[in-house]
Image: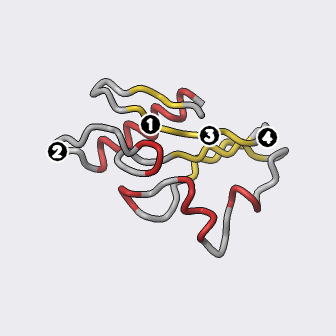
């Protein structure tokens, strides 16, 4: 299970599936509490539906959710923090 470290000490969990030329960052339903395992509860699961020879699927757990739940909760964490986490995951993937 890959993790990417963030400057505040958070460790953000992500997985990469597929080797296709089109990268897709998958943010599960749940907003700031979304995590990869939620895809299995949805009517459409891109982890199963998208062909891995056409797409590289990068699924992540947002900080404070799923396997990223141990990330420190800081006052002021908001969408900008989450966007920075998402960019860090893409860079690491």
Residue at 35%, 40% in the rendered image: 70
How far apart marks 1 and 3 lie (CA) works out to 10 Å
Q: Mark 1 points at which residue?
A: 12
Mark 3 touching mark 4, by CB under 8 A?
Answer: no
Which labelled disc corresponds to residue 15?
Answer: 3
Q: Name the residue under label 2.
A: 76
How far apart marks 1 and 4 lie (CA) works out to 23 Å
Q: Nearer the viewer, residue 91 or 29?
A: 29
Mark 2: few/some/many CA within 10 Å (<14, 14-19, 20+): few
Residue 93, relative to residue 34: is it above or below? above
Q: Mark 4 points at which residue?
A: 20
Residue 37 lies, in percent from the top left, at 57, 57
Mark nearest the camera among 2 and 4 is: 2
Mark nearest the camera among 1 and 2 is: 1
Quarter the N terminus occupies: top right
Q: Earlier in the sequence, mark 1 or mark 4?
A: 1
- When asked about the image quadrant of residue 71, the answer is top left
Element type where label 1 sits in the image: strand
Residue at 72%, 42% in the rendered image: 17
């Amino acid at each position: 299970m890959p993790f990417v470290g963030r400057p505040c000490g958070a460790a953000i969990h992500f997985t990469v599936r597929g080797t296709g030329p089109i990268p897709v960052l998958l943010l599960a339903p749940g907003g700031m509490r979304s995590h990869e395992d939620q895809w299995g509860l949805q009517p459409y699961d891109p982890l199963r539906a998208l062909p891995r020879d056409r797409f590289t699927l990068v699924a992540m757990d947002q900080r404070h959710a799923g396997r990223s739940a141990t990330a420190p909760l800081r006052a002021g964490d908001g969408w900008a923090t989450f966007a920075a986490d998402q960019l860090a995951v893409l860079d690491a993937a």
